[in-house]
Structure formats: C-alpha cells, structure tokens
Amino acid sequence: MRRLLQQDILLSQRLGNDSPVGFAPGSPATAAPQVSNSSFVPEAPVVTPEQPFFLMTSTAQTISGFFVWTALLITCHQIYMHLRYYSSPNEQRHIVRILFIVPIYAFDSWLSLLFFTNEEYYVYFDTVRDCYEAFVIYNFLSLCYEYLGGESAIMAEIRGKPIESSCVYGTCCLWGRTYSIGFLRFCKQATLQFCVVKPLMAIITVILQAFGKYRDGDFNVASGYLYATIIYNISVSLSLYALFLFYFATRELLVPYSPVLKFIMVKSVIFLSFWQGMLLAILEKCGAIPRINSADFSVGEGTVAAGYQNFIICIEMFFAAVALRHAFTYKVYMDKRLDSYGRCAPMKSISSSLKETMNPGDMVQDAIHNFSPAYQQYTQQSTLERGGGPPLSRSHSNISTRGDNEKTLLLSSDDEF
C-alpha cells in the first residue's frame, strides 16, 4: 500500500497534476503550468523599452524630415512661381490648390511622427490631410473643364457620341449610351459627393475616437473603423471612377495639355495612399505590426501601423513634388504676360492671388448648381482666352475663330446619364 502511495506521489510530481493525497492546493509540487489559449488570429508582438523601435528613433525622424522639407521647398517654389505669373486665374487657381497637397500631406505626416507616442494625436492630424484630398479631386476635374473651355465647349464636342463599351476601362455597363449633359453632371456630382462625405466621416472619426469607439485596423463590428472604411472606400472609388470616365470621354481633347502624367499623379497620391493604409491594417490584423508597452506610455498596433503609413508618405511626397513640378509647370504661363500689343498684362500681388486661390466659394456654388433641381434648364457661360499658352484643343480653336471671348449655350439635361 505504501509503495502504491509513493508511486502516485511521484507520478503527480512528474505530470504537474494536483495530487489526490496529502498535498494542499497550490503547493509548488502540484502547481499546474499555465497553458496559453490558442486562437486563429495571431497576437501582435510586444516591443519593450529595452528594444529600440525604429519610428521612435532620431534616424527615422531625420530621414522623414529631410524628405519632407525638401518636398516643401520644391513645391513652395512652384506655388510661388504660379502666383507670380498668375496670368490665367481660371486654370492656375485649381493648379495651386492641387499643388498644396504636397505640403499638407508631408508636413501633416511628419507631425504625426513627432507625436508618435500620443495615440490620439495622429487621428486629428490625419483628419486635415484626408479632408484636403477630396478638395484635390474636385479641383483636378474642374481644371480639366477649364482646359476645354467649360461644359458648353465640352458638350459641343462629345454630345451624342456613343460611349465605347470596354471591360478594361470600366465602361461595359454603359453599353448603348451616348454622351450627354447628364454625363457631365454625373462626373461633377460624383466628385462633389466625396467633398461632402470625407469631411463628414472625418468629424465622425474624431468623435468616435474621443469615446474610444475607433481604432485603426480594428475590423470588429462593434468598432467604427469597419464602417468608416467601407463608406470611405465606396465614396473615393466612385469619385475616382467619375474622374476616369471624364478622362476617357475627353482624352483626345486633352492631348495638348499632357493629361496622362497629371491624371496618374492625382490618382496615385490619393488612391494608392488609401490602399497603402489598408495593406498596413491587414498586416496589423495578421500580427505583423507590433505594439509598444512601457511604464510611461502604451502605443497600440493600430497607431504603429499609422506611424509606418506616415513615414512612407513623408518619403513619397518628395517624389510626388518632383513629378508634380513637371506635370503642372508654371513656364507655360510666363508667355501669357504679354497681350496682343506686346505690353505686359497687369499682375496682382502674390498675397491677393493666394487669397483668391484658396477661396472655396467656387466649389460651393458649383455644388449648389449641380445638385439643384433647377439643373434641368440652365445657361452655362464660359470665358475663353485668346492667344498665348499651350496649343488649343479643337473646341478652343473653333470658338476663338469667331472672335468671341465669351460663349453662352443653353444646355438641357432632359437626357440624363
């Protein structure tokens, strides 16, 4: 009997199970080892203060700062030159607004890196950046309108032509349709809706963040990140799709203005940055993004993913600044300073030109116009410039030969798109 009792004690000590005889619960000899719970979602690794994290080092801040300030110098000089040779306000107003995306994106992302350990700060910084990208999409479409002389001149060229059906270009669902004023209205409405949805979602994001209901990369149905991502993805996709449809319809008319580089740059800066953030969110969900815990602060994996996003944007904005300098050059407007008599045209001061450029009143009026029920019958007036500048499109040349600076055309939207 004693031998059997000893065998039971030895067996319990080896297996780590609770002994049924003579040992109190919790005894060192009978304490069971803790077994970690397994799950299908991998846990994010933890970085301790003893392990230096790259985004918190001076190396990361120096590298990002170098690219940011270089991009700022390149773009600010380009903006200054456009304001100095502000000879075509209708076009350069939209160009300057587009160029401002580099300083806003770069400086905003750099500030987010400097305040990396404050988990909530990056949300407020990114809100400003995200709101401006909607403004850029609208201004690029408006710039294309100005290049072609406005809705009147565009409709004079494309109205009644059949829409080419192509699965590659995303126009297969438009088979059998023709270009109409409703088509142009759809393009404007699709871009303007993003200008409304994006700021609204940014405000909702800040509110959810304040109540602890929003965290980057949290796809839980109880979190606001999932729903904000779905709404934002639908809105920005619709906006960029409308921008592509307009380019598809007018690509031949826009050839003198080299639209390919402009179109690629606007789409890449906005759309690719969004999918870049989505990829980092997926990596975070897979456990590839670590979280940082210390006695002084705690940074979640969502904030770490946003930090990587901001670091990458800081570098990307340098290359965007170089590309935008070639896409929206100011040199084509330098020759427009001279009128038909060889005299210098009067130039506004740079400060007043900048104030006129950043006034969003034209966007508000355009939104009221395109969403108004009175759109069924309206008069569109477009001011056309004569002489100077890059080669004119067919719509410009046909109208300018009449010797008219302004053309008014009654357009009807009875044939809605």
Image (cartoon, rainbow, N blue to C red):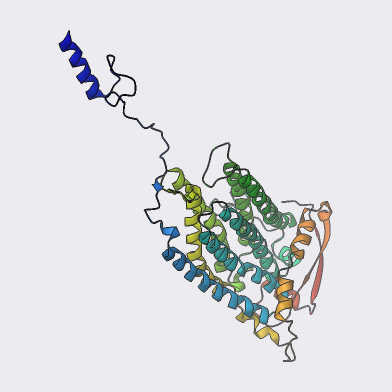
Toward the top, the furthest residue is: 1
Closest to the observer, 128 or 298: 298
Q: Residue at x 58, y 55 (%)?
A: 121
Above or below, 25 relative to 120: above
Toward the bottom, the furthest residue is: 342
Closest to the observer, 319 or 45: 45
Q: In the rendered view, does 227 fall on the left or right side of 154?
A: left
Q: Position of residue 328 (x, y in %)?
A: 59, 73
**Residue 329 visible in the snapshot:** no
Above or below, 70 relative to 282: below
Q: Quadrant of the N terminus?
A: top left
Q: In the rendered view, does 155 fall on the left or right side of 270?
A: right
Q: In the rendered view, does 161 fall on the left or right side of 381?
A: left
Q: Position of residue 149 (x, y in %)?
A: 72, 70
Q: Residue at x 44, y 58 (%)?
A: 55
Above or below, 22 relative to 242: above
Q: Quadrant of residue 365?
A: bottom right
Q: Position of residue 360 (x, y in %)?
A: 74, 64
Q: Residue at x 54, y 61 (%)?
A: 109
Q: In the rendered view, does 7 fall on the left or right side of 218?
A: left
